Structures are given as C-alpha cells and as structure tokens.
Amino acid sequence: MGALTMTSYAAVLRPRASTPHGPRCAAAPPTRRPARPATRSPAVNATPREWGQPAAAKTTRLYSLAPCPLLLAALLPGAEPVRAVFEPFVELVKTLDLPGWLVHWGHPGNMAVVLFAMGGYGTYLGFRIKLSDDPEEKAKAKDLHPKLLAGLFFFFALGATGGITALLTSDKPIFERY
C-alpha cells in the first residue's frame, strides 16, 4: 500500500465501472432471457409540471440550546444570592436529621437512577429509530424518544437544585472548590 501514489489512489477508490481502462474482468456471456424492466420511483415518473412543487417529505428539526443565557449566571456576585434563596429549604432539610451518608450520596444516587433508567431507555429508543425495519415500532420510538429525553432534561434541571441543597445541607461551599 505504501507504493500507491495519489493518482493510483483515485483509480483504486473509483468504482469498478468507471475505471479509465474499462472493466477488469471479461464481459459476461449474453443470456437468452430479456432484461427485466427497471422499477421507477414516483419521483421519476412525475411530469415536468410536478417537479417544481415541493414533495411531501418529512422534515427534521434540530433544536439546540444557546449557552449565552447560562453565562448570565456569571454576573451573580457570588454564592451568597444563591445561598440566600436556598436557605429556608436547607434549614427545613436540616431539621429532618438525615444521616450523613444519605445527604452525601442520596442526590448522586438519584441522579444515577435517572441517568441510567431514562437515558438508557432513551438511547435504546434512538437506536430503534435508526435500526428498526418495522415502521410501527419506528413510529412509536419516534414519538416516545423526544418526550422521554425532555423529561430527562427536566429531572436533571431539577437535580441541580437538589445538588445545591445537598451541598448546603452538609455545610459545603458552592460555586468553589473545597
């Protein structure tokens, strides 16, 4: 392979029917059967008048989240406004006298359950959309997949408040390393 040059790469990667010297094998002997007519798609059979009209094709919408609003959180003067907002709820949680291991590992454990349950099933549905040959199964997966992952995003957004509450309940600093 090391002796190939760029021009020979083009010949190697080119489809066999379009090599400059013709096919590399001998032509097949003619058969007695007539050739079968090729089936044509409806787009090929359309009249020129229908060509300019948009087809009733499915469209794919891509949604994205702009990070600019999240950067506004950097304008906060520090952790004190967030701590002040969460303080009443943190005092309520502290009155429950929960064991230290539950305060420390309860939130990460719950987030792991959400990640593996909803994220795992959402991943499975995504692969069913791509790989399934059954149109009914594919339609069900296309319906459930965005709903499930929107729920996953919702629970992770709520999980951020739970994480801050867990940190403040265990008297750890937020927005800084400890």
Image: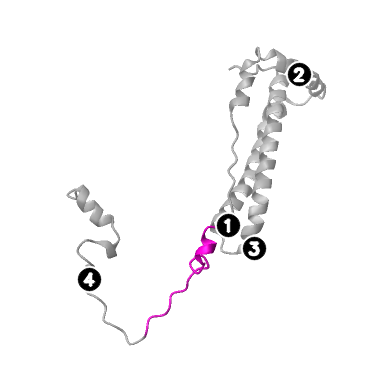
Residue 28 forms part of the magenta stretch: no
Circle 4: is it few (<14), some (14-19), or many (20+) Cα within 10 Å?
Answer: few
* Residue 177 percent coordinates (x, y): 58, 17
- What numbered label is drawn on residue 136? 3
Q: Which residue is mark 2?
A: 85
163 shown above or below 147:
above
Q: Which residue is mark 1?
A: 57
Q: Which residues are magenta?
A: 34-53
* Residue 45 percent coordinates (x, y): 50, 69
Q: Disc 1 marks which amino acid?
A: Ala
Q: Nearer the viewer, residue 122 or 27?
A: 27
Report, in whole angstroms, how far the alpha carbon at label 2 lies from the one at label 4: 78 Å
Q: Are marks 1 and 4 in contact (CB under 8 Å)?
A: no
Element on which disc 4 rests: loop
* Residue at 19% in and 50% down: 4
74 shown above or below 147:
above
Decide which of tag 1 and tag 3 comes sooner along the chain: 1
Element on which disc 3 rests: helix
Q: Disc 3 marks which amino acid?
A: Glu
Circle 2: is it few (<14), some (14-19), or many (20+) Cα within 10 Å?
Answer: few
Q: Are marks 3 and 2 in contact (CB under 8 Å)?
A: no
Quarter of the image containing the C terminus?
A: top right
Decide which of tag 3 and tag 2 comes sooner along the chain: 2
Report, in whole angstroms, how far the alpha carbon at label 1 lies from the one at label 2: 49 Å
Between marks 1 and 3 in the image, the one whose residue lies nearer the viewer: 1
